């Protein structure tokens, strides 16, 4: 039983770390191919293992023996999300999962479909023929509108959209620290990014705590997630719900998942459709056949099978959550390898999704692979757009419904084209963002006009 093979020596490890800092997932795929699936190296006192073998990934994600916790980078997100589902551990995580899961089942999120479609149609109606737009900024705005309504309700006061801007700033500063030499220093070292993060965290607290306290004091509950979380009770103690701090942490976690990751998934999808007009044409034909010119509803989602396949394929190529991190709490055996205590164990959905062992022609954008049986026999723990195991994203049904309805609403009126042939860079932050946005030219579908579009949003 040995530590996995990988880069050795100061020069080779330094090169590997530099490549990892520039593009973590691409480097993990390169090391996986070079070393036969799993690789490891030592960076100072830190042991890092890149895991690329599905059976071993399953052992880590299922974690039957409780040997793994979230890694240091994920735990560092507590400055943004506190002790929400993303970062909490043990009994706290189990309790919160029990309280939150019922509010995010397919049945309970059905009421949000109308808000999702409305926001997307309002966006599409404002797009003008031949204008050049940053669709990443557009999708961030659309998903922000959706998450504000579904989280906090239609009666939300104006000005609370600043929650999205504060979270964006927090994410940018957090990324500046973890993807540079700064991550090697203790958290108390006052880098400018860390100082800004502390200030923005206070701003975020002020806004969200204010929302929670006002809603709790009013006693008015609706169908939004804040209302449902306020009403949630522990089965073991029906009188016990969440306190204000836990509500704050879970709301910010859900906000991040519903806004940031879905905006990225939709942005990459629109780029891929612009680069593959034949896919755009097939998706548009399906939307016209299933939905026509009316507003799409929850009942349409299951019939939009090609739209769903386009999104699945987009998230294969550009998985919004591109790295899953765990930390070993003790020395342990994992397959034929020995994993030291406190080692960081990293799983890259991006690397798995681009691995020729699992996907034919992995660089090709081919939605049909999700419909023609090509992916029917994928090993477990290979396609991981929402993570896996007990800690799979609790909002995965919400995210897919949001993405399908938004994409369908846009496709009814607008298609996009590339402005140039320059490759869109990837910014591998906490989520997989497009570097510098995605600039596309809008074309209106045949027969569409601003007047018609205005009627469609009514």
Image: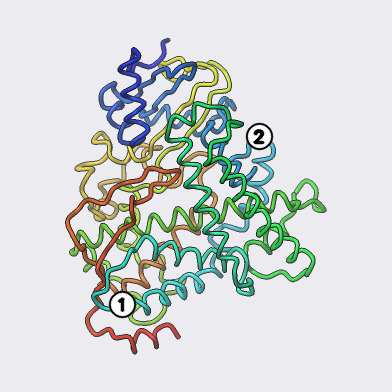
Q: Look at the numbered discs 2 and 1 and tell me whether their residues touch, using CB distance below 8 Å.
A: no
Q: Nearer the viewer, residue 235 or 136?
A: 136
User: Which percent across, then down, holds residue 152?
Assistant: 62, 66
Instruction: Residue at 37% x, 73% y: name it.
Output: 409
User: Which percent across, then down, holds residue 211?
Assistant: 69, 63
Answer above or below: position of 332 versus 130.
above
Dividing the picture into quarters, in which one does residue 346 lie?
top left
Question: What label does residue 387 carry, if any?
Answer: none
Dividing the picture into quarters, in which one does residue 14 lie?
top left
Residue at disc 2, secondary structure: helix
Mark 2 surroundings within 10 Å by alpha-carbon count, few (fewer than 14), some (14 through 19), many (20 or more): few
Q: Earlier in the sequence, mark 2 or mark 1?
A: 2
Left or right of 195: which side holds 302? left
Work out which quarter of the rendered image holds the C terminus and state it. Answer: bottom left
Residue under pointer 2: 90
Q: Residue furthest top?
A: 1
User: Which percent across, then down, holds residue 276?
Assistant: 20, 60
Dividing the picture into quarters, in which one does residue 331 lie?
top right
Left or right of 419: which side holds 107? right
Mark 1 surroundings within 10 Å by alpha-carbon count, few (fewer than 14), some (14 through 19), many (20 or more): many
Work out which quarter of the rendered image holds the N terminus and state it. Answer: top left
Instruction: Residue at 74% x, 51% y: name it.
Output: 242
Label 2 to label 1, Cα distance in Å?
Answer: 47 Å
Residue under pointer 1: 413
Answer above or below: position of 136 versus 321.
below
User: Which percent across, then down, holds residue 289?
Assistant: 29, 76
Instruction: Residue at 34% x, 63% y: name it.
Output: 135
Residue at disc 1, secondary structure: helix
Instruction: Residue at 58% x, 22% y: name it.
Output: 329
């Amino acid at each position: 039983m040995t530590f996995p093979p990988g880069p050795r020596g100061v020069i080779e490890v330094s090169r590997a770390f530099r490549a990892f800092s520039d593009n973590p997932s691409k480097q993990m795929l390169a090391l996986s191919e070079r070393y036969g699936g799993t690789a490891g190296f030592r960076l100072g006192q830190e042991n890092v293992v890149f895991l690329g073998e599905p059976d071993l990934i399953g052992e880590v994600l299922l974690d039957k023996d409780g040997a793994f916790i979230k890694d240091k980078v994920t735990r560092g997100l507590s400055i943004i999300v506190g002790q929400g589902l993303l970062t909490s551990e043990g009994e706290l995580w189990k309790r919160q999962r029990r309280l939150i899961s019922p509010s995010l089942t397919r049945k309970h999120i059905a009421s949000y479909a109308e808000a999702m479609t409305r926001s997307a149609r309002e966006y599409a109606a404002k797009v003008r023929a031949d204008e050049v737009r940053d669709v990443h900024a557009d999708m961030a705005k659309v998903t922000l509108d959706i998450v504000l309504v579904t989280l906090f309700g239609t009666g939300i006061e104006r000005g609370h959209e600043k929650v999205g801007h504060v979270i964006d700033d927090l994410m940018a500063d957090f990324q500046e620290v973890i993807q540079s030499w700064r991550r090697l220093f203790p958290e108390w070292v006052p880098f400018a990014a860390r100082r800004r993060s502390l200030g923005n965290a206070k701003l975020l607290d002020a806004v969200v705590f204010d929302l929670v306290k006002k809603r709790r004091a009013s006693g008015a509950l609706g169908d939004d997630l804040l209302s449902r979380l306020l009403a949630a009770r522990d089965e073991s103690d029906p009188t016990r719900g969440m306190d204000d701090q836990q509500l704050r942490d879970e709301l910010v976690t859900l906000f991040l998942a519903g806004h940031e990751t879905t905006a990225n998934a939709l942005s990459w999808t629109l780029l891929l459709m612009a680069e593959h007009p034949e896919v755009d044409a097939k998706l548009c034909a399906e939307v016209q056949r299933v939905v026509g010119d009316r507003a799409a509803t929850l009942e349409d989602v299951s019939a939009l099978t090609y739209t769903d396949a386009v999104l699945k394929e987009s998230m294969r190529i550009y998985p919004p959550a591109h790295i899953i991190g765990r930390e070993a709490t003790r020395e342990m055996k994992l397959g034929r390898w020995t994993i030291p205590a406190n080692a960081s164990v990293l799983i890259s959905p991006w690397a798995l999704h681009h691995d020729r062992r699992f996907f034919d022609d992995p660089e090709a954008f081919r939605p049909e692979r999700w419909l023609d049986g090509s992916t029917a026999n994928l090993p477990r723990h290979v396609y991981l757009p929402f993570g896996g195991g007990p800690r799979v994203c609790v909002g995965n049904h919400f995210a897919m419904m949001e993405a399908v309805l938004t994409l369908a609403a846009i496709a009814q009126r607008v298609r996009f084209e590339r402005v140039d042939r320059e490759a869109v860079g990837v910014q591998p932050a906490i989520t997989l963002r497009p570097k510098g946005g995605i600039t596309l030219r809008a074309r209106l579908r045949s027969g569409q006009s601003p007047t018609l579009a205005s009627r469609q949003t009514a």
